[in-house]
Image: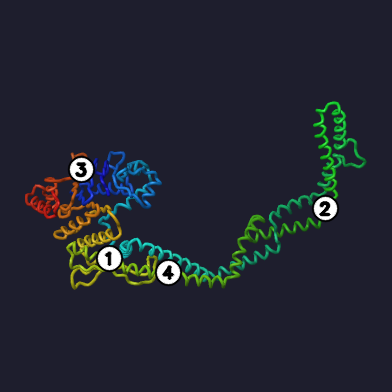
Amino acid sequence: MLHELTISDLGVIESARIELGPALTCVTGETGAGKTMVLTGLGLILGAKAVPETVRRGADAALAEAVLDAPRTGEVAERLEDAGIDVEDDGTVVVSRTVGASRRSRTVIGGRTVPQALLAEVAEALVTVYGQHDQARLRTAARQRATLDAYAGPDHQPVVAEYRGAWEAWTQATAALERMEQGADAARAEVARLRDDLAAIDALAPQPDEDEALAAEARVLENAEDVRTGVAAAHAALGGGDGGDDHSAVAALDAARRALADAARHDPSLADLEERLSGLVYGAGDLVTELASYVEGLDADPARLDEIHERRSDFAGLMRRIGVADLAGVLAYAEDARPRVAEDDAWDTTLEQRRQAVDSARAALDHAASRLSDGRRAAASALAEAVAAELHRLAMPDAAFAVAVEPTEPAPHGADVIAMTLASHPGAPQRPVAEAASGGELSRIMLALEVAIAERVHEGSRTFVFDEVDAGVGGRAAVAVGERLAELARSHQVIVVTHLAQVAAFADTHVVVAKATDGTVTRAQVTEVSGDARIEEIARLLSGQEDSQTARAHALELLEASGVAP
C-alpha cells in the first residue's frame, strides 16, 4: 500500500504532503483546483512518463515522493535486490521522481537511481489505476477481449501465449509456402542461371590464390633472359665461374677464414669470430649451388607462357560473367550458389514438406484456438455472474449483463469475437454495452468490471486508484458506488478522486485540494479534513455552498448514514 505522498512544484501545487490510510481515501476539490496534479504526482511515483511542462512556473524541477510497501517475494523483489535497493525494516521503500523543467528527470528507489522501467514494474505489482478513459474497455472489441482474458486469471495466460505462438508459426509456414508457389518460375529461372555459372566455374576448377600465382609465373617467363643474366652474374660473383676465380666472394671469405684460424691458435678469443666466418663461407657456397640449379632449371618456354595467358584470360571472362573483381569473389559466389542449386534439385520434395508444415501448423493453431475459446467461454460465464452481482450492489438490479464468445476465423488474437452486451431493464434486448448504457451506467459497469477483476486476479491486499469513476452518476446510484468502494476498501487500499458527496461521505480519509491566488500567483493547497471542515466540504459538493445550513444538514446525514465519523 501507499503510506504517504509528497509533491512539490508540480503544476499549481507548491508543496503538499498527504498521508494515505489503509482503507478508503477520497480526494475532492473544485474544478481546476489541482486534483489532476495530485493524480499526476501519484502517476510519477508509479512510473508514468515525466512531462517537463508540468513543472511549476519559475521552479527548476518538480518532485514527487512516496513511501510504499515493497514486494517481499517474487520477480519484482528479485529485481529490487539485484539493483541493490535497500528495503526498510518495516518493509517499505521510499520512491522519488524528479522532473526537470530543462534538465533530465531522475528516478530513485531506496536511495538508488534506477531506470523508470523498474519503478513501473514495482508499481504494477502493487497499484492498479483506473481513470475515466478506461471506459474504452467497454467500447472496443479489443479492450473487451483483453478484459475477459485478464479476468480468466494467470492460468489462462499460458493458453493465450500458446495461441499467439501457434498463430505466428502458421503464418510463417503459410508465407513460406506462398513464396515458393508464387515465385516458382522466377526462382527456378534464377537457379538455372546459377547452375550454368557453376558449370563454367567447375570447368575451369580455379584454386584459391591461383590468379596471383599465375601472374607471378608469367612475369618470370616474360622476362626470362633478364632473369637468367642477373642470376648468372650473381653466381659468378660469388665464385661460380669456370676455373675457380681467386677473386670471387667465396674465395675471399675462405681466405679470411684461414687467416683468422691461424691467428686463433695464438688468441682463443678469436675462435668465435672464426666460427661465424666459417658459416658465411658455407652459406655462400650453398648460394652458389642454388643459383646454378636455378639457371639450369630456368626455361623460357613460350608454350607455357601462352598457357598461362590463356588461363588468366579465362579467369577474367569468368569474373566479368559473374560480376566480381577477383578470383576470390568467384569462389565465394560458387560457395553461395551450390546450396541454392542443391535445394532446387529437391524442389518437389521441399514443396511437399512446406505443404505438410502448413497443415501441421494449422492443426496446432486450431487446437490452441479451441483451448483458448474454451477458457474464454468459461471466464465469460463467470464474469457475467460477477458483474451482475456487482451491478445489483450498484443500484442496477434489473440490468442483465452478458459476455458473448462467438466463433470466427483465426486471427492474431484468437478464433472468436468477444462482445459485452447489456439489457438495461427486463424485456429489453441485449445490445452492445456502449450503446445500451447511459454515461452513469457505463461508469458503474466499468466499476463492476474492475472490482470483479480485482477480486479474482489480485491476491492479497492491493492499492486501487479510481479517477472519477463515478462520472455521470447521481442520487441513489452515487450512494451505491460509495458503498461498493467502501466495501472494496475493507480488503484493499482504495484512493478515489470524486466530485460526489455521496462517495466522499464513505471515505475513511478525506483530502481536499483548494486553490488560492494573490492576484499574481496561483497555488493549490492539499489538506486532510475532518470534523466540521469535512462537513463543510461535503456540503460544498452537495450545493456549491459550504455555509448552507440545509446542505450542512444533508452532509451530516450522509456521513451518519455511511457509518463513518465526520
Q: Earlier in the sequence, mark 3 or mark 2?
A: 2
Can you tell which of label 4 and label 1 is closer to the viewer? 1
Above or below, 163 relative to 233: below
Q: Position of residue 397 (x, y in %)?
A: 18, 66
Determine the residue located farthest toward the left in the rendered image: 549
Determine the residue located farthest toward the top in the rendered image: 266
Does residue 498 appear to the left or right of 340 in the view shown? left
Q: Earlier in the sequence, mark 2 or mark 4?
A: 2
Q: Position of residue 187 (x, y in %)?
A: 56, 68
Residue under numbered circle 2: 300
Can you tell which of label 2 and label 4 is closer to the viewer? 4
Does residue 7 appear to the left or right of 341 in the view shown? left
Is there any visible trace of residue 337 in the rendered image?
yes
Residue under numbered circle 4: 365
Residue 458 placement: quadrant: bottom left
Residue in the foreground of this view, choosing between 342 and 263: 263
**Amino acid marked by disc 1:** Leu
Element type at marker 2?
loop
Residue under numbered circle 1: 383
Label 2–label 4 contact, CB within 8 A: no
**Amino acid marked by disc 4:** Leu
